[in-house]
Amino acid sequence: RRFLQGAVVTGTVAAMQHHQAVRRLAWQTLGQHGPKPAKKIVFKGPGMLRGLSSLPNADLPATGPLAGLRVLDLSRILAGPSSTMLMGDMGATIVKIERPGGGDDTRRYAPPYIQKKEGEDSDLAAYFVSCNRNKQSVAVNYTKPEGQAVLHRLLETSDVLVENFKTGTLAKYGLSYDQLKDKHPGLIYCSITGFGHTGPYSKRPAYDMLIQAMGGSMSITGEPEGEPMKMGLSMFDLTAGLHAVIGILAALENRRLTGLGQHVDVAMLDVSVALLQNQGMNYLAKMQRQARVGNSHPNVVPYQVMKSKDGHFILTASNDEQFERFCIVGDAEELLQDERFNTMKARVVNRVHVTQVLNDVTRKHTTAWWLEQLERENVGCAPILHLDEVFADPHVQARSMEIKMDVPGCEEPVSLIGSPMKFSETPVNYRWPPPRVGEHTEKILAEAGYSPTEVTELCNLGAIDKLKNAPQSAARA
């Protein structure tokens, strides 16, 4: 009780080693004693989380392992927003800085839009919604000195800044890492760019497809005789976002030990090269280009799409034991005596012949028959699902990978993709629906110490903006 009522708790790193457990107890206690918000609590000392501020929504406090972490999010599009949403789901307070008026570019990446009601679009693009929940939007024009001053005020209680502007852009506004580090020595400043902050390409803009092309993945994707093929996902936007989170968490651990922040420089091209992994090593081992193998695996056969009597399925017999069990199931045991089939190396060397013969075997039965029989014998296999089938899958539903949130302006709860992070002690939760531009400007600035008069003056100067007419919804899920 004393913990919740106190305005400030101080201590050294050693004295506060169990701050997460204490914080969870505080959240639990708050939940047991009603929705009255806690006062501001700040851990002072080297390596502590700065700005453990009042709860974003008193009746639904953050429960994840990053509760208390405060992130100033200057990113837009996908790579940065996907990383900050992950941290938001895990409990961090994400303050999303957007341009007054237009906001994040992906607000206009539509259609499709989220449905206001059946058959009627809302004004929320599905793309924007995909990576912007658990965030509070503040509209700031930081090209103006007054807007820059607002960001400097918000940085006083921020642990992390995330941005994905082209290298050098924020330096024009006094917001680069080098310009901030002396005033905010504990700040973790994460930049996500196409090519990084060093090297001959550092000033270039980038998009996911450009990185797929330049990072080599397109050269090894597609049918052997076809054209190079991009992946169906924005793979390197998303994986750059994942690497940003990993880098930020590592830098926070270092700050816990040293009290010092640092610059985390994540380049999409670097990520794409790193993720070549075994394919990249296949090249480096002999310095020979890899031929495309379509839906097959370069080092394992069969590990690919197989034809069935009524469609296709995936077969991954990734060792000799599984291949033997496949042959028994498929009544093709004679293949085990054929030197072109009886070892993993032989099957790779004789890939074309092996694939043709195995497709003749799998065409004899339906997909459902193969899945039932192969699963029983512990041979890797899977159906190839469309997205409607994915979200209807009982396992996907059981793992809460589709969630519902009440979104202002929508008459029914909106389906969103859930977090893949499952924590036994500090579960993720979904506190804020994707925001409107400037929806939380007044709230966040008031928390930062601005008076209503000062907020009005900043609006009149064009340094900030706020949501004029917020859509209503019955509740927040």
Image: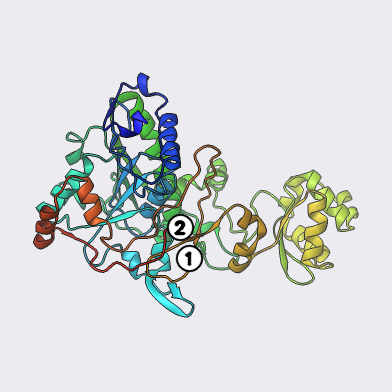
Q: Residue furthest front?
A: 33
Q: Quadrant of the C terminus?
A: bottom left
Q: CA distance from mark 2 to mark 1?
A: 8 Å
Where does the image place residue 362, in percent across and percent down from the top left?
80, 64
Image point (28%, 48%), residue name: 200
Q: Which residue bears the numbered disc 2?
A: 477
Q: Quadrant of residue 373?
A: bottom right
311 sits to left or right of 28: right
Q: Is residue 357 above or below residue 153?
A: below
From the viewer's side, name the closer residue of 276 and 432: 432
Q: How is the image coloured?
A: rainbow
Q: Is residue 168 visible?
A: no
329 sits to left or right of 474: right
> In the image, what residue type sits under mark 2?
Ala
User: Disc 2, disc 1: CB below 8 Å?
Assistant: yes
From the viewer's side, name the closer residue of 430 and 353: 430
In what element is the residue under mark 2?
loop
Q: Which residue bears the numbered disc 1?
A: 413
In what element is the residue under mark 1?
loop
Where does the image place residue 211, in percent across and percent down from the top left?
41, 56
